[in-house]
């Protein structure tokens, strides 16, 4: 279980994630489309996820999207602890109608992200499409993972975003599983997965 409370002058965010869940979720960010994407992480990753956020939505959605991503990443990092025995790296290729999204990640302890998506509209669900790469980068930073996302093709931006989040969920599920062959050892020749 990983739990994080984050409070700034712009937002107040609470996240709890259980890596060994069943996909149960409760997400209330004030941004219905963000809630929908967080639900994808829970359902398709089989994580139990609770997210509560209050942000300065009268300004715009940016601070809420960013701070939810930071808190979610930190919750995953806390849930994994020293990362001993985990599979560590995984990928997923997810189709959604016209779209095919690829997500590859590694809980390396070295935050890095490459996000390649061609957008067709300025926003979906009241959230600027420019915020989704920032969400993913912020998540990777706090989770301590390397994250590569590529939408190979797609026409509908809603489908592109949703396919990315489904792919993220499936890759996270695979990477966070315990590999019994490791017998609790750290999956690294360095002997550590910390920065």
Image: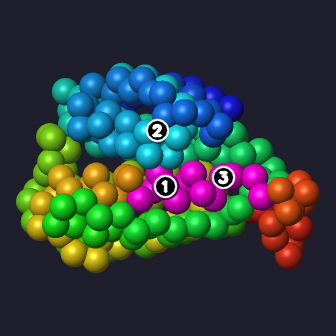
Q: Is residue 70 visible?
A: no
Instruction: Write the residue at 72% across / 46% down.
Output: 80
Q: Is residue 173 magenta?
A: yes
Would you say the residues marked 1 and 2 are in contact, meaning their CB atoms lie under 8 Å apart? no
**x and y, in percent, of residue 107 in the image:** 65, 61
Residue 115 to residue 37: above or below: below
Q: Quadrant of residue 41?
A: top left
Q: Give me the disc on residue 42.
A: 2
In terms of secondary structure, where does tag 2 sit? helix
Determine if the magenta segment contains residue 45: no
Q: Which residue is farthest left?
A: 121
Range of magenta residues: 167-179
User: Measured from the top left, where is residue 27 in percent x and y?
Assistant: 39, 26
Which percent across, then down, holds residue 64?
A: 35, 35
Q: Which mark is residue 176?
A: 3
- In the displayed structure, would residue 128 be above or below residue 2? below
**Near-viewer residue (50 or 171):** 171
Q: Quadrant of residue 167?
A: bottom left
| Mark 2: few/some/many CA within 10 Å (<14, 14-19, 20+) | many
Mark found first going from the N terminus, 1 or 3: 1
First in sequence: mark 1 vs mark 2 = 2
Q: Secondary structure at mark 1?
A: helix
CA distance for labels 1 and 2 = 10 Å
Q: Position of residue 109 (x, y in %)?
A: 69, 62
Q: Which residue is mark 1?
A: 170
Identity of the residue drawn at 89% across and 54% down: 184
Q: CA distance from mark 1 to mark 3?
A: 10 Å
Q: Which mark is residue 48?
A: none
Q: Quadrant of the C terminus?
A: bottom right
Q: What is the number of callouts on the image?
A: 3
Instruction: Classify mark 3: residues with Cα within 10 Å, few (<14), some (14-19) or many (20+).
Output: many
Label 2 vs label 3: CA separation?
Answer: 13 Å
């Amino acid at each position: 279980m990983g739990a994080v409370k984050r409070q700034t002058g712009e937002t107040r965010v609470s996240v709890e994630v259980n890596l060994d869940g069943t996909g149960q979720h409760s997400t209330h960010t004030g941004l219905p489309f963000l809630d929908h994407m967080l639900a994808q992480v829970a359902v398709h990753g089989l994580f139990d996820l609770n997210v509560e956020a209050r942000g300065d939505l009268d300004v715009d959605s940016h601070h809420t999207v960013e701070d939810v991503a930071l808190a979610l990443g930190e919750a995953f990092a806390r849930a994994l602890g020293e990362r001993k025995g985990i599979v560590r790296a995984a990928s997923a290729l997810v189709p959604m109608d016209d779209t095919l999204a690829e997500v590859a990640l590694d809980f390396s302890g070295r935050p890095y992200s490459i996000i390649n998506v061609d957008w067709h509209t300025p926003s979906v669900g009241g959230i600027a499409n420019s915020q989704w790469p920032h969400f993913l980068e912020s998540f990777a930073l706090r989770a301590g993972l390397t994250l590569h996302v590529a939408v190979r093709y797609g026409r509908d931006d809603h489908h592109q975003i949703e396919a990315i989040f489904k792919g993220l969920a499936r890759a996270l599920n695979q990477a966070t599983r315990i590999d019994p062959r490791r017998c609790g050892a750290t999956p690294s020749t360095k002997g550590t997965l910390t920065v």
